[in-house]
Image: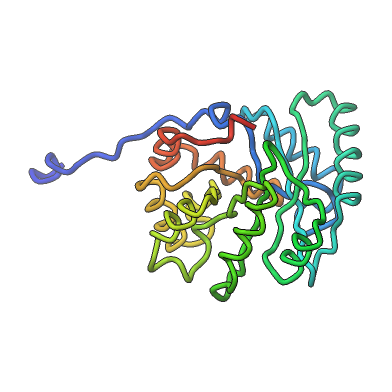
Amino acid sequence: MGFLDRFKKKDVTLDPIDFSLIGVDMHSHLIPGIDDGSKSLEQTLVMLAKFESLGYKKVITTPHIMSDVYHNTPDIILGGLEQVRNAANDLGLSISVEAAAEYYFDETLLARLQANEELLTFGNKNVLFELSFHAVPDRVEQLIFELKTRGYQPILAHFERYLYYHSNPQKASWFRDQGVWIQLNLNSLGGHYGPEVQRQAEKIIDHGWVDFVGTDCHRIEHLMILEKNATKKYFHKLLELNLQNKSL
């Protein structure tokens, strides 16, 4: 070892976080065959077993409702949930499974609200919604107003993944000021979606602008990546925040 090497800061190896401290995953795609998530009941059961082994007590799975691609309805989602619950029980899994939806913000979501169509929710009327990845959406303020006036609590999915907000991480604070809670994908912290998304995730953690975390799990590989990265510093920093997951 050279003389200067003695003064180099050594990397600190952290223990993996205890996922039971998060307790509930509120963003995943585990109903088989209805969106871009699980393709079969067998895949779903493998993922649920992994969630349980990681320490999660509950999974609230949130299939896409997206008018151009995934024409899911509450009946489709809740019917799939019943199938999953029965199979998980037969397998002897103890993890609790619930379902809501991840609503894509397009013209049909506003139409659903204006027609007083009941949305799939979790917790205290929480509604998970996502924005376009490609363009800054119009009428976000109207969407928030329509949700809030109908008694829903909006939660914006994976804020860190919207590239058009990367130059303006303070937009997360703006959403929270409007009464919208912010959800972060855990695998963003391991670089799964690229370094820019990871940096944005770290920024909003540093500012405390995260209310929920989710796996956004579509396949077992997502949980394996999560387990692999659970020693990283920002996973530990997350646990210092007042996350809402355990309230669900």
* Vertical relation: 77 (above or below) 122: below
For image coordinates 71% across by 50% down, the residue present is 219
As rendered, which of 217 and 72 lies closer to the eye?
A: 72
- Residue 95 vs 167, above or below: the answer is above
Question: In the image, 17: left or right of 27?
Answer: left
Hey, which quadrant is residue 64 in on the image? Answer: bottom right
Q: Is residue 142 visible?
A: yes
On screen, 241 above or below 95? below
Image-based side of 196 in relation to 120, left or right: left
Query: Foreground: 5 or 196?
Result: 196
| Residue 214 locus on image (x, y percent) | 60, 44
Task: Work out whether residue 184 can be spotted.
Answer: no
Q: How many marks are shown on the rendered structure?
A: 0
Q: Residue at x 74, y 33 (%)?
A: 49
- Measured from the top left, where is residue 23 in percent x and y? 60, 29
Query: In the displayed structure, would residue 201 be above or below residue 25?
Result: below
Q: Quadrant of the N terminus?
A: top left
Which residue lies at the image location 42% right of the left edge and 66% below the top edge? 166
Q: Position of residue 4 (x, y in %)?
A: 9, 46
Image quadrant holding the C terminus, namely top right
